[in-house]
Amino acid sequence: MYARSTTINALSGSIDAGIAQVRDEVMPALLEMPGCVGLSMMTDRESGRCIATSAWRSQEAMRATDQELWSVRDRLGRTLGGTPMVQEWEIAVLHRDHRSVAGACIRATWVKVDPARLDGAIDVYRLASLPRLEDLAGFCSASLLVDRASGRAVSSVTYDSQETMDANREAAASMRSATAKDAGAEVVDVGEFELVLAHLHVPELT
């Protein structure tokens, strides 16, 4: 399974219009494309960072739509007031305790690892990090997307509410440091987001 993420640093006053455009125009168009298995969107209203991620059954299906989606991304960028940045990923891990609910939030962690050590880092996430994440208050689901060529990866952990994510911030930070050390990874960025659209239909990948 593969994913394509589109990140736009939006103008704060345009975020709601962007969410509506993704929900009402982008998502229906995507779901008609062969191989697409859904879309999610998360936003950080404080920074303006918006990330929409589509999931695909194969890399071939994902890349076959790239040219067709350029105009879609361009229109979304104009609505949000920012330039789309596109990244392609392999979905290495996805574990879902339960479906997300209204008000769910995501903590995303971007890391960099030596590509030669990436499989080992995935195993650390799957075997050591996931069981600890499940113990955090409000845990809903977790995913790990990787780019094998560059060694980049992003972990996205969904919680039931802003309150539960706030409450586990310190424990999550300690866990993040330990996991990065065990995996030989460098933490590049951490962000917290509202989950504003959740329509991914990716099966369990553990």
Image (cartoon, grey):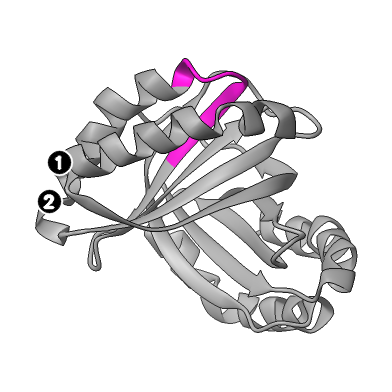
Answer few, some or many: residues within 10 Å of disc 1's Cα (few below 14, many 20 plus, some between 14 and 19).
some
To which quarter of the image does residue 13 belong?
bottom right
Q: Pinpoint residue 203: horizontal percent, then vertical percent.
A: 49, 31
Q: Is residue 34 visible?
A: no
Write the residue at 47% across / 61% down: 61
Disc marking residue 135: none
Seen at 25% across and 68% down, the residue is 150
122 lies left or right of 19: left
Q: Amino acid at mark 2?
A: Arg
Residue, disc 2:
117
Q: Secondary structure at mark 1?
A: helix
Where is residue 206, by image quadrant? top left
At label 1, the amino acid type is: Gly
Q: Is residue 150 left or right of residue 153?
A: left
Which one is nearer the viewer's eye here, 76 or 121? 121
State the extent of the magenta-drawn residues as a range. 134-143
Q: Return the residue at label 1.
A: 120
Q: Is residue 51 magenta?
A: no
Q: How far is disc 2 from disc 1 in space, using C-alphas?
A: 5 Å
